[in-house]
Image: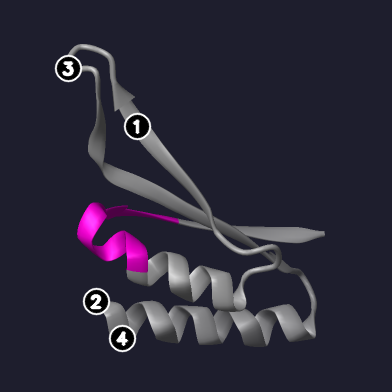
Amino acid sequence: MWLEVSIQVNGEAAEAVIELFNRYGHGGAVVLTEFNEEFDEIGGAVTVRTYLPISREGLETRRRLEEGLWHLS
């Protein structure tokens, strides 16, 4: 079983969050962007997602990930 962790951030913060999720997430980070068809461009906010195993080790990794996000805020 897996725990999905995702956060929506602006473009400036995305790079730091992606690096953090790549470090701690299983399989790295997945980045989802919103496309604005009216203006034919990518919006400013992105969703960064990763997965953690539901296990004792996964809980420790989740704690480290939350701590890393706290430092970025």
| Rendering coords of residue 11 (x, y %) | 24, 53
- Judge whether residue 2 is colored magenta: no
Mark 2 to mark 3 CA distance (whole Å)? 30 Å
First of labels 4, 1 by sequence position? 1
Q: Nearer the viewer, mark 1 or mark 3?
A: 3
Amino acid type, mark 1: Glu
Q: Which image quarter: residue 72?
A: bottom left
Rendered view: 42 above or below 19: above
Circle number at residue 71? 4
First of labels 2, 1 by sequence position? 1
Say which quadrant the C terminus sits in: bottom left
Question: Would you name the residue on which mark 3 appears?
Answer: 39
Say which quadrant the N terminus sits in: bottom right
Do labels 2 and 4 touch, CB within 8 Å?
yes
Circle number at residue 34? 1
- At horizontal 27% and vertical 45% (from top left) the residue drawn is 45
Range drawn in magenta: 7-15
First of labels 1, 3 by sequence position? 1
Mark 3 to mark 4 CA distance (whole Å)? 35 Å
Q: Which of 73 and 15 lies nearest the eye of the viewer?
A: 15
| Rendering coords of residue 12 (x, y %) | 21, 61
Do labels 1 and 3 touch, CB within 8 Å?
no
Badge 1 marks a residue whose secondary structure is strand
Amino acid type, mark 3: Phe
Badge 3 marks a residue whose secondary structure is loop
Q: Nearer the viewer, mark 2 or mark 3?
A: 3
Question: Would you name the residue on which mark 2 appears?
Answer: 73
Q: How is the image coloured?
A: one colour
Badge 2 marks a residue whose secondary structure is loop
Q: Is residue 25 left or right of residue 9?
A: right
Rendered view: 41 above or below 63: above
User: For the view shown, which residue lies furthest in the front direction?
Assistant: 40
